[in-house]
Image (cartoon, grey):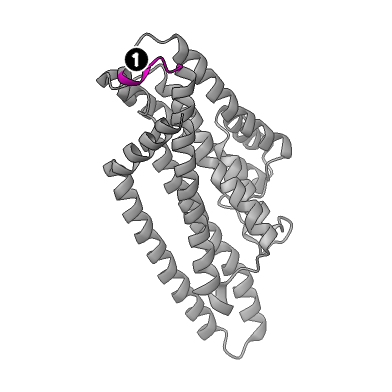
């Protein structure tokens, strides 16, 4: 299995999409840092002589700014996971590169698990660096102006959910790649991610407007593809103040006015595990 993991590392790192994503991620972090610095400076200048306004602006923008950074950071991470893993099996079947490995009497289950551990571990490292980079910028660049008040336990808990997102996407990618072409699998996964993405907005909007129908639509979309619930749990774990009107965790459709239940988090984990097991079963029977 270890040779497959190493080959997966090399293949993923050598892809142009990986290089482009790294460069764009650095640009995103720089932009986030510049925005954080300017917001902090504006708050400091506008609140001179008005302590109450200063505290209110700080409480609002510290969580809002970090939360929006994490939202778009999770979006970038998801795109990297989709584009880098959706062709991991199908492309090698089409090019017959997989014949070299299967000719060595390697079990197909071992081959697929090697792909999974290689993809998920590298994506998890990327997600962790993205998350910690955003947290670091918020804490150091934001300084005393827009730095959110975060404890070590909150950061570790939120990091775990943030890292789980690309792992779940890798599981579903391998499932699609085990029986479809790369293009078909990519389009399908992007559509599924979009359903979960929009469904999350709809659910939060329904909760904000107290419209149960919209909330139910969001719940159904989350059951179909539950990745958006992971981000919602990230904000809840990080800020731990859903009932605080100044917290990002309670702010509109970008926030989490309707936090996911523990049952939903367990369902998300089982969703990814089921996708991986089904991928092994289908790939075992596939004619290559």
Question: For this rendering, which residue is in front, 58 or 25?
Answer: 25
Q: Which residue is found at the position 60% from the left and 35% from the top?
A: 218
Instruction: Name the outermost residue toward the bottom.
Output: 49
Is residue 259 a member of the stretch shown in magenta?
A: no
Taking the view exactly as shown, the residue that stands out farthest to the front is 104
The residue lying toward the viewer, choosing from 163 and 78, is: 163
Residue 221: x percent and y percent? 57, 31
* One can see residue 192 in this view: no
Q: Position of residue 137 (x, y in %)?
A: 49, 68
Q: Is residue 159 visible?
A: yes
Q: Nearer the viewer, residue 191 or 271?
A: 271
Residue under the image location 26 percent in, 43 percent down: 16
Question: What is the x, y in percent for residue 38?
Answer: 44, 75
Magenta stretch, main secondary structure, is loop
Using the image, determine if residue 215 lies above or below residue 109.
below
Residue 37: x, y in percent? 46, 75
Quarter of the image with the C terminus is top left
* Number of marks drawn: 1
Q: Which residues are magenta?
A: 100-107
Residue drawn at x 66%, y 49% as measured from the top left: 257
* Left or right of residue 154, residue 185 in this image: left
Relative depth, front residue between 129 and 198: 129
Residue drawn at 57 percent across, 84 percent down? 47
Residue where numbered disc 1 is placed: 103
- The kind of secondary structure element at disc 1 is loop
């Amino acid at each position: 299995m270890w040779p497959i993991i190493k080959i997966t590392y090399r293949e993923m790192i050598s892809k142009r999409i990986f290089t482009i994503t790294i460069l764009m991620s650095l640009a995103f972090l720089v932009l986030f840092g510049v925005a954080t610095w300017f917001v902090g400076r504006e708050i400091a200048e506008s609140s001179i002589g008005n302590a109450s306004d200063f505290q209110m602006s700080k409480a609002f923008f510290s969580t809002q700014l970090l939360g929006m950074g994490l939202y778009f950071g999770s979006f970038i991470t998801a795109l990297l996971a989709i584009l880098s893993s959706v062709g991991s099996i199908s492309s090698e079947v089409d090019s017959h590169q997989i014949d070299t490995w299967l000719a060595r009497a390697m079990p197909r289950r071992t081959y697929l698990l090697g792909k999974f551990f290689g993809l998920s571990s590298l994506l998890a490292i990327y997600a962790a660096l993205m998350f910690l980079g955003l947290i670091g910028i918020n804490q150091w660049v934001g300084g005393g102006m827009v730095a959110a008040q975060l404890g070590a336990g909150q950061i570790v808990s939120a990091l775990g959910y943030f890292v789980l997102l690309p792992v779940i996407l890798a599981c579903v990618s391998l499932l699609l790649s085990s029986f479809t072409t790369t293009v078909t699998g990519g389009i399908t996964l992007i559509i599924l991610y979009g359903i979960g993405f929009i469904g999350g907005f709809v659910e939060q909007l329904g909760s904000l407007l107290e419209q149960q129908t919209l909330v139910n639509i969001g719940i159904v979309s989350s059951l179909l593809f539950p990745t958006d619930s992971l981000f919602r749990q990230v904000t809840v774990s990080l800020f731990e103040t859903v009932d605080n009107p100044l917290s990002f965790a309670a702010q509109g459709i970008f926030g989490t006015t309707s936090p996911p239940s523990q049952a939903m988090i367990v369902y998300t984990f089982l969703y990814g595990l089921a996708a991986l097991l089904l991928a092994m079963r289908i790939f075992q029977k596939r004619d290559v």
